[in-house]
Image (tube, rainbow, N blue to C red):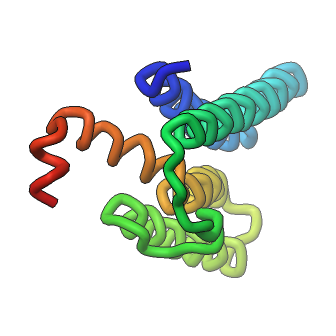
Amino acid sequence: MNRERLKKVFWGAVLCMFLMSLSFLFMPYASAAALRVSGAWFWATLLAGYGLFTAADRGRKKLTAKRKKKTPKARPGIARVFANGWARAADIACAASAAGFLSVMLAAPRSRAAYPLLSTVVFTAHMHCVLNGENFRFFTTAEKSGKKGKKGAAKR
């Protein structure tokens, strides 16, 4: 699989993670049948998102193995913070949304405001892991170096 196709798979995984987090928004309003649909939506997008993410990760590893690039073993995205500007924003948003969710749950546990905050916590936690990870770095730097060519790489 080429890099451009893998990039689409990667962003498809991010989209599925976003759609999975939206399933929490419909839970307080759902009837019994709609709750089943919401649950199916949750599991389908969760499995699709992580299936696509795994495919993008394996493809990235195959591409880097073909190029014989020896990169040092980096910590997984869940164990890193502030790896880049996008990750910094996701990390701050994750901490703020988690604090907001905990505050609402302590102040008014039955509040409907908990659901949007839970949705935000779940999505920003996913983005913390994804944006601090090697796959995001690979696909964003590959995009930049692919446009500049050899001359742009020599200037670095």
Foreground residue, 102 or 79? 79
In the image, residue 82 above or below residue 16: below
Closer to the camera, 20 or 49? 49
x, y percentage for residue 85?
31, 64
Residue 128 position within the rendered picture, expressed as x and y whole percent measured from the top left:
54, 61
Residue at x 66% of width, y 79% of height:
107
Give the position of the N terminus as an image quadrant.
Answer: top right
Q: Quadrant of the C terminus?
A: bottom left
Residue 105, relative to residue 133: is it above or below?
A: below
- Tell me if 112 is positioned left or right of 12 in this view: right
Residue at position x 61%, y 53% in the image: 126
Residue at point 25%, 42% (across, down): 145
Task: Please tell me which residue is depicted at 19% across the width and 49% down the height of the picture.
Answer: 153
Q: Quadrant of residue 34?
A: top right
Q: 13 or 1, which lies in front? A: 1
Tell me if residue 22 can be seen: no
The image shows residue 59 at horizontal and vertical percentages of: 61, 32
Pinpoint residue 52: horizontal percent, then vertical percent.
Answer: 66, 29
Q: Is residue 115 left or right of residue 132?
A: right
Number of labels in the image equals: 0
Q: Is residue 88 left or right of residue 50?
A: left
Q: Nearer the viewer, residue 120 or 44?
A: 44
Residue 140 appears in view? yes
Of all residues shown, which one is farthest toward the front? 68
